[in-house]
């Protein structure tokens, strides 16, 4: 080993220490080469990723339908179907078209590269490759996607999802429940007399209260539940696998927490709130707009009936 190589190793190690370690990102490796697939799965798992693998297009499709992935690596030359068969499937699905896609291919001709990029690939790596390079490309793609999603889909004040993400993700949830029949409920939550908090204590305190409620929701709902800020002081929660009755119980539990303690504190002052909520369970053939309207109507009824309550 030369001094130069040693220096590079040291730089590499230093660099590696500054990288953000994986935070539960789930990858899907699709390759019909069993040895390469097993190798990639092993290395990626060692690097801290959650990894699933598939040997052909069909089983890949099955996995993709069942769970969500943060990145997909796709072998181009496979049997019986080539990797190209998967592109259409990936790119026409609203849930999948934003998932980073790296093509791993034995073909280095420009034709395949160009075709893949035009079809929607985010990167193209020619076999044989060094694992470290692939790992770096995966890291970079995941990081950029995360930054992009943060900016496009999160509410900057509260950190929960924004209306744009809700509009996108609700389509995904609807498609899922149509494919795999199950229950799913939606809840509209609106802070009671929020205007008086702003008027009495000022807008910055109102902002703290919004952050406090968002935090309370995040801390008391499941990771699979979707929490979004729908408008000013209105949140919407979508609970997959949950009936209206169970969603009502869950939200009532959170409402009780607002009775037990302040939702925000500032300069020694504590701020309490209550909210009104409306629950609606999705039924087959219920259009999205109608589903939303029912949850909103139920919330409005909760207001009419004295606020500080959850209604079906
Ligand atoms: P109700 O119980 O009927 O819901 O009464 P309310 O006062 O909560 O309802 P209203 O819709 O009249 O008032 C909502 C207020 O929320 C008005 C608006 O100034 C405030 N608001 C909306 N967005 C924000 C925000 O980002 N920060 C703060 N501090 N206030 C906001
Ligand atoms: Mg192959
Ligand atoms: Mg409101
Ligand atoms: Mg309100």
Image (spheres, grey):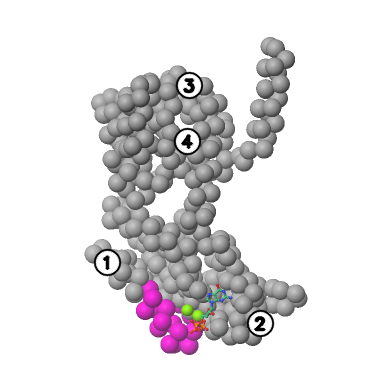
Query: Image quadrant for the C terminus?
Result: bottom left
Which percent across, then down, holds residue 132? 55, 26
From the viewer's perspective, is the residue at label 4 or at label 2 nearer?
2
Say which label, 3 or 2, has the lower sequence index: 3
Q: Would you say 255 lies left or right of 187 here?
A: right
Q: Is mark 3 in CB contact (under 8 Å) with mark 2?
A: no
Q: Quadrant of residue 24?
A: top right
From the viewer's perspective, is the residue at label 2 or at label 1 nearer?
2
SS type, badge 3: loop
Residue visible at 52% across and 62% down?
155
Q: Which residue is mark 1?
A: 287
Label 4 to label 2: alpha-carbon separation? 49 Å
Q: Would you say 249 lies left or right of 312 here?
A: right
Q: What's the magenta region?
A: 295-312
Q: Is residue 298 highlighted in magenta?
A: yes
Res 51 label: 4
Residue visible at 36% across and 28% down?
113
Label 2 to label 1: alpha-carbon separation? 41 Å
Say which label, 2 or 1, has the lower sequence index: 2
Residue visible at 64% across and 80% down?
202
Say which label, 4 or 3, has the lower sequence index: 4
SS type, badge 4: strand
From the viewer's perspective, is the residue at label 1 or at label 3 nearer?
3
Note whether 241 is above or below 248 in the view shown. Answer: above
Q: Which residue is mark 2?
A: 201
SS type, badge 2: helix
């Amino acid at each position: 080993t030369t001094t130069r190589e040693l220096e590079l190793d040291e730089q590499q190690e230093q660099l590696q220490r500054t990288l953000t370690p994986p935070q539960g990102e789930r990858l899907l490796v699709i390759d019909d080469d069993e040895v390469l697939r097993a190798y990639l799965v092993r290395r990626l798992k060692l690097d801290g990723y959650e990894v699933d693998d598939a040997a052909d297009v069909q089983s890949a499709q099955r996995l993709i339908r069942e769970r969500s992935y943060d990145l997909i690596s796709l072998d181009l030359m496979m049997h019986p179907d080539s990797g190209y068969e998967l592109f259409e499937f990936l790119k026409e699905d609203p849930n999948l078209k934003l998932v980073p896609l790296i093509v791993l291919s034995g073909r280095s001709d420009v034709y395949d590269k160009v075709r893949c990029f035009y079809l929607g690939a985010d990167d193209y790596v020619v076999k044989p490759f060094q694992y470290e390079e692939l790992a770096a490309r995966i890291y970079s793609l995941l990081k950029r996607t995360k930054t992009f999603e943060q900016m496009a889909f999160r509410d900057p004040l509260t950190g929960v999802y924004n209306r744009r993400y809700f509009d996108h993700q609700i389509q995904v949830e609807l498609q899922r429940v149509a494919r795999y029949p199950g229950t799913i409920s939606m809840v509209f939550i609106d802070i009671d007399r929020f205007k008086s908090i702003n008027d009495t204590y000022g807008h910055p305190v109102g902002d703290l209260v919004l952050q406090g409620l968002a935090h309370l929701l995040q801390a008391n709902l499941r990771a699979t539940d979707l929490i979004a800020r729908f408008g000013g002081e209105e949140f919407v929660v979508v609970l997959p696998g949950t009936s209206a009755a169970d969603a009502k119980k869950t939200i009532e539990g959170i409402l009780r927490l607002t009775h037990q303690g302040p939702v925000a504190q500032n300069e020694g002052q504590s701020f309490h709130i209550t909210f009104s909520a409306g629950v609606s369970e999705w039924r087959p053939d219920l259009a999205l707009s109608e589903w939303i309207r029912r949850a909103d109507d139920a919330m409005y009824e909760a207001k009419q009936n004295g606020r500080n309550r959850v209604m079906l």
